[in-house]
């Protein structure tokens, strides 16, 4: 039974500690929209998305008003568009991107994810065409996000795809250089991508999902930090317990929003993703949680251990609060989207090498990192390969979202605004991996993939 203290605590979380529902994402299957005539396919896509998500924004606003919980983003994820493009041989997949953009504007949603391809074991018809069109698609749209899965624990790493993606990331940045290279900020390269992720830019609606569903992403770094501030001097077992209890409360709010949205929209409830997703706002930082544990600054020795504790405790608390926890669920460390990370990177305490170590124990990977604009495509590809190897060997989702800051060098700042924030251009090791990357082929799956 809810008592007065619970109500007051929730109000405090929302008003003072930046608790919000980061996104209500409707996943929509487009498999029944496949057609060899791309114009007919695009019309089917537009009609289905606008029919299913017609009331999404209005319902989310109703729930916000009733519960007093901010819902920051209303998003849509769709079937990887490469599957539709496969039927439209010789025709540019960019038409699909423009159709998704038209639908997003008609519905008033913030982003549509799923301009994607899954190539962990090789290229199917449509994959290459879609991948090569990504820079153009992201440059001519504002609300479309793209992702490519280049590896998995079961399949290994497709190094031909890794090589290609270095060039795609660089070109996406170049074509949007007049808009602070925003194209690269809307593109994620995955290993072990999940099918029910509600967070952008990596969301897509997996082929194993229902025809449509609602996935909710919650966020509350400020709430966790505030809770820890009341437990100063206690040992790390008590710290973990505090985080677990706080994650439980945050996830219950996400479950409530998801259930109401599902009932009112008549769409099945999928999952709650309980990831701690930070923002550039002061007091809403994962880095500041780590510092609250006792680190002088995020990036120093002990950061990886503190992050491992945080990630594990968040998951344990969340799974007790909902029977449908999914997505990525844990702690995100996007540099430009986290005030504490931005400060640590600016002072030099947080380096790219330390971030790579941290990604071994957090939810995703190298996220929203600005690198010098003259970084070679091969270095970008090698960075992707390194992260994919960590994900493949450890059976976890890993991602790379780096932004080559065209025309900028180490120490300069690149700003995106809004939730994407801003951050310094970080140093990256430029020792050439050219020969290694251009060998191509596949890095075989590890022994632990043989689980049957």
Image (tube, rainbow, N blue to C red):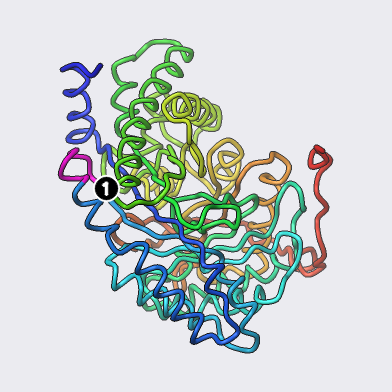
Residue 91 visible, this angle = yes
Residue at point 60% right, 78% down?
Answer: 85
Percent from the top left, x then y, of residue 41? 51, 80
Quadrant of the image for the C terminus?
top right
Residue at point 78% right, 70% down?
Answer: 438
Judge left or right: residue 149 versus residue 320.
Answer: right
Prevalent SS, magenta region: helix
Percent from the top left, x then y, of residue 176? 42, 77
Vertical side of 129 occupied by 150: above or below? above
Residue at point 55% right, 72% down?
Answer: 170
Vertical side of 274 occupied by 377: above or below? below
Judge left or right: residue 411 versus residue 339.
Answer: right
Assess disc 1: are there few (<14), some (14-19) or many (≥20) residues with their C-alpha within 10 Å of its C-alpha. many
**Does the magenta run of residues contain 293?**
no
Quadrant of the image for the N terminus?
top left
Vertical side of 130 occupied by 327: above or below? above
Judge left or right: residue 180 versus residue 17.
Answer: right
Percent from the top left, x then y, of residue 147? 55, 63
Dot 1 falls on a residue whose secondary structure is strand
Q: Quadrant of residue 116?
A: bottom right
Front position in the image: 116 or 439: 116
Q: Which residues are magenta?
A: 63-70
Judge left or right: residue 219 versus residue 33.
Answer: left
Q: Which residue is mark 1?
A: 71
């Amino acid at each position: 039974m809810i008592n007065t203290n619970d109500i007051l605590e929730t109000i405090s979380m929302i008003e003072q500690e930046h608790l919000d529902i980061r996104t209500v994402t409707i996943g929509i299957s487009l498999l029944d929209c496949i057609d060899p005539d791309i114009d007919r396919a695009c019309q089917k896509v537009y009609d289905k998305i606008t029919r299913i998500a017609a009331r999404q924004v209005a319902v989310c606003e109703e729930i916000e008003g009733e519960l007093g919980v901010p819902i920051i983003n209303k998003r849509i994820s769709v079937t990887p568009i490469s599957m539709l493009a496969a039927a439209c041989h010789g025709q540019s997949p960019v038409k699909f991107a423009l159709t998704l953009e038209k639908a997003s504007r008609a519905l008033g949603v913030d982003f549509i994810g799923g301009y994607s391809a899954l190539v962990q074991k090789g290229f199917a018809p449509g994959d290459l065409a879609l991948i090569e069109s990504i820079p153009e698609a992201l440059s001519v749209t504002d609300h479309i996000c793209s992702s490519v899965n280049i590896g998995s624990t079961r399949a290994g790493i497709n190094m031909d795809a890794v090589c290609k993606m270095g060039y795609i990331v660089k070109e996406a940045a170049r074509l949007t250089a007049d808009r602070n290279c925003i194209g690269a900020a809307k593109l994620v390269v995955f290993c072990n991508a999940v099918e029910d992720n509600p967070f952008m830019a990596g969301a897509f609606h997996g082929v194993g999902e229902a025809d449509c569903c609602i996935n909710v992403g919650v966020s509350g770094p400020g709430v966790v930090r505030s809770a820890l501030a009341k437990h100063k001097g206690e040992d790390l077992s008590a710290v973990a317990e505090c985080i677990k209890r706080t994650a439980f409360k945050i996830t219950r709010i996400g479950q409530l929003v998801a259930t109401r949205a599902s009932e009112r929209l008549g769409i099945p409830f999928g999952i709650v993703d309980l990831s701690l997703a930070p923002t550039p706002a002061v007091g809403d930082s994962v880095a500041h949680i780590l510092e609250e544990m006792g680190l002088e600054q995020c990036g120093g020795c002990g950061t990886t251990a503190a992050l491992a504790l945080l990630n594990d405790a968040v998951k344990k608390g969340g799974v007790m609060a909902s029977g449908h926890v999914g997505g990525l669920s844990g702690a995100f460390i996007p540099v430009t989207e986290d005030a504490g990370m931005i400060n640590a990177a600016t002072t030099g305490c947080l380096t790219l090498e330390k971030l790579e170590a941290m990604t071994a124990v957090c939810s995703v990977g190298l996220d929203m990192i600005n690198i010098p604009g003259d970084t070679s495509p091969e270095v970008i590809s090698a960075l992707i390969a390194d992260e994919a190897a960590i994900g493949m060997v450890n059976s976890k989702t890993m991602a790379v979202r780096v932004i080559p800051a065209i025309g900028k060098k180490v120490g300069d700042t690149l700003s995106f605004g809004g939730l994407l924030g801003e951050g310094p251009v970080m140093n990256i090791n430029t020792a050439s991996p050219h020969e290694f990357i251009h060998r191509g082929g596949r890095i075989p799956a590890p022994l632990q993939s043989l689980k049957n």
